Amino acid sequence: MRLNQEQQEMLAGKFGRGCQKAMEINIQLAEAQGAEELVRISYAHLMPPDVMFFPYGRQGHWANDMTGELTKDVEHLRVPATIEPKFCQLAVAKTLQFPDDVSKEIGQIQGAATDFYERIGVIPTYSALPFYVRPGRFGEHVSIAESIAILWYNTMFGSRCERDDGVTSLAAAITGYCPLAGAHLQENRYGEVVIRLGKDLDFAKFEDADWDAFSLASSRLCKEKRPVFVGVPKNIGVTELKHLLAVIAVESGLAIMHIEGVTPEAPTLEKAMGGAKPLAEYTVGKKELLEAYQLANTATGNDVDFVLMGCPHLTMKEIRDLAEVLEGKKIHNNVKLVAVTTKLLYEQAKDMGYADAIQKSGAEFTCDMCIAFAGTQVKGTIATNSIKADFFYAGFSAEGKRQVRFGSTKDCARSALTGKWEGKTL
Amino acid sequence: MKNNYQGKSIKKLGVVEGEALVTTDLVAFWGGTDWETGIIVEAGHEAKGKNMAGKILVFPAGKGGAGDTFGWYYLFRSGKAPLALICNRPQNTTLAGALLTDTPMIYGFGEEIEKVIKTGDIVRVDSDRGIVELK
């Protein structure tokens, strides 16, 4: 490993124990990856365990064992940084069935952590979509801890980042460096396989949920190989991109993918592949899309107890869809609806009257929290417009307490009005 | 048939030996695995219901959210983590989780290692030399 003078000084402890520990983590990771040097970054997105990862009970205290030594004497970060959602807004903790004592503990652990990060200058985005606040630049090196944001900065902006997590991104932000490895290097950015839509489907007729199902179906075909999507409309919107990127980011663990004619490193298929031949070519047709819907719909009955939306945070189009269905109506007595977005969009949705329309229906609409994680403790059937959230709702527990219905934003909103699943039945 | 497979070890942590749990599906530790028991719970996963606690986990690559490292860490703190990790593509979050807990991990083999080793095989993982030996 080659270290420059500043890096050697950090390692020697000249800038305190936190910075020294961060450099140790950087070097360990670089050696594990086979990197020969560290690269200077211009931005970091943080995912502190005590902000987001079930900050209560015994695991709430494990966070300090992971990041306590790193943060103890750190007073500032060397790069601008944004931050992941909080685990849960206390205002909706009761709706999400957290007992009062647990809510209190969440408030203490999460509150102390967010106070700390705000004090050292982290921009309080509390969202997995930090690009509204800090867009990427082509070719810059960054460190990001959030699967969709990693995929978004690499794929949509052409920034360079690896799949960093809450510890490694913090180490990068404290030192201003991260290992020069993985998707930071050109040879690990090219597409490996090609994915097309079957002739029996039409992107122009896709609802938001269809992009999720398409993404899951694609992921089951390409597995960990980097795909180039061919035939996606050039005018694809942010909402559709969010659905496409969010699912495959988790299901395939990808740092980067390409969309021919849309993303900056894929002006042509050939360029996206770096001139190499695809290892495989896949087609997602009606059959594969239906299989994805079936996989995501784990519920057997038709009753819906919870409608949880906003993983990743709702876009303005989704907020408008929700408001259009709920306006002037009341959600069913047996249903709890919690919808979440970023503070920026929440404020704008207030100005546009959408927030009012949603809240007057009896639904709860809030911002800055992770509905995918905070929604995992409810008992009953959850309806969601996100397969990423679905993965977490159906996951975690071997007991399988939660059943999930998956469909479009409008289908979920309609289900909240009737208490029955109003989406596609397959 | 050869018995030794050379890969890259993430850190020199000695030798461990144990029973293999093999899957050809990608593995998520956060959400995909129950950190209280070590059981794979992901819907549609090839190894759903299998317990990875105390095993040598053999898989093509990690997946999941960027919080996957924490999933591994919670599993480790619950005493339900595998003894060692053997995979082909080194997902960054898997590397970071193994480093955080000093768990031996070897990756990057010349062949698809998850198709060579079978569940129930006894495997010796030499993290000092980056060698996986099939007993």
Image (cartoon, helix red, strand yellow):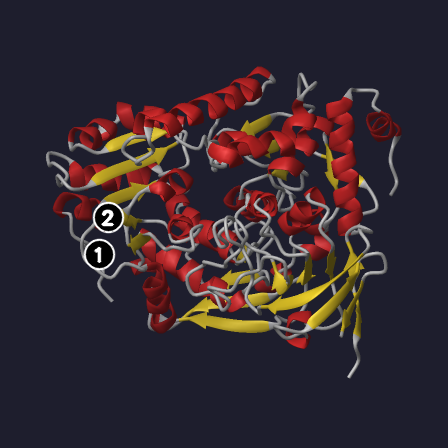
Q: Is residue B78 above or below residue A190?
A: above
Chain letter of the residue beneath label 1 in the structure image: A
Q: In which quarter of the image is residue B83?
A: bottom right
Q: In which quarter of the image is the C terminus of chain A?
A: bottom left
The location of residue A22, given as percent across then percent down, is: 73, 31
Q: In this view, does B43 lie above or below A34?
A: below
Q: Which mark is residue A423?
A: 1
Q: A89 or B74, which is in the foreground?
A: B74
What amino acid is at disc 1? Gly
What amino acid is at disc 2? Cys
Between marks 1 and 2, how big is the CA–CA gap? 7 Å
Q: B28 or A280, which is in the foreground?
A: B28
Residue at position x 57%, y 54% from top? Answer: A254
Residue at position x 22%, y 63% from top? Answer: A425
Badge 2 element: helix
Chain letter of the residue beneath label 2 in the structure image: A
Badge 1 element: loop
| Residue at numbered disc 2 | A412
Residue at position x 24%, y 38% from top? Answer: A337
Q: Which mark is residue B15?
A: none
The location of residue A368, given as percent across then percent down, is: 41, 29
Using a 10 Å C-alpha cutoff, classify the residue at mark 2 as few (fewer than 14 neighbours), some (14 to 19) or many (20 or more). many
Task: Examine the rendering and report whether any part of residue B7 can be seen.
Answer: yes
The location of residue A116, given as percent across then percent down, is: 56, 19
Mark 1 in CB contact with mark 2 (< 8 angstroms):
yes
Q: Quadrant of residue B20?
A: bottom right
Residue at position x 18%, y 44% from top? Answer: A416
